[in-house]
Image (tube, rainbow, N blue to C red):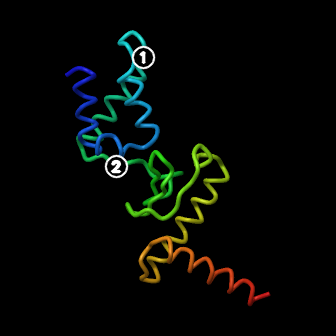
Amino acid sequence: MNYQEITAEILQGTNNGDDLHLIDREVLDFISDASPSDVSEMDEVAFFELCARVRKGYRPPWFHGFENLTIDRVGFVSWRGRQVEHYDLPWAFEAKARVRAERLAEDCRELERLGKEVCEANLWQLRDDQRAAVSSAL
């Protein structure tokens, strides 16, 4: 198989690339646009590893390492595949965003613990309730 055939397979297995994580998309785009002499051994390894993950059923990496939290290539953050917030890019990958993502993951787990649907409206309500509890304790 050549790079073009593998690229087509990756695109087919990832909703025309729309499901790819930003870094995975960069790997795919680089290999697709590069001449063979521009592709390093490291680039090729990343490309073939991506292909192997797509063949196994692609799942994007966890956002900032928080299980069940992912981000798409335009900044929509999802919990278990459901959009819950939007982060501006490239800010989403900065240290401050990691702190915010950690809080988001905690809040999503709390909603699940309470038996509530994890969605933007319930996240806002949970945060309002938390703020009210802090205010009343003061």
SS assignment at label 1: loop
Q: Position of residue 62 (x, y in %)?
A: 45, 52
Callout 2, which amino acid?
A: Arg
Q: Which residue is mark 1?
A: 40
First in sequence: mark 2 or mark 1? 1
Instruction: Check disc 2: other Cα within 10 Å, few if <14, some if 14-19, many if 20+.
Output: few
Q: Position of residue 103 (x, y in %)?
A: 59, 65
Residue at 46 percent across and 40 percent down: it is 22
Residue at 25 percent across and 28 percent down: it is 6
Q: Is residue 95 left or right of residue 3?
A: right
Q: Which residue is mark 2?
A: 59
- Label of residue 121 in the image: none
> Gap in Å between the C-alphas at discs 2 and 1?
25 Å
Outermost residue, bottom direction?
136
Outermost residue, left direction?
1
Callout 1, which amino acid?
A: Ser
Which image quarter: residue 38? Answer: top left
Residue at 22 percent across and 26 percent down: it is 5
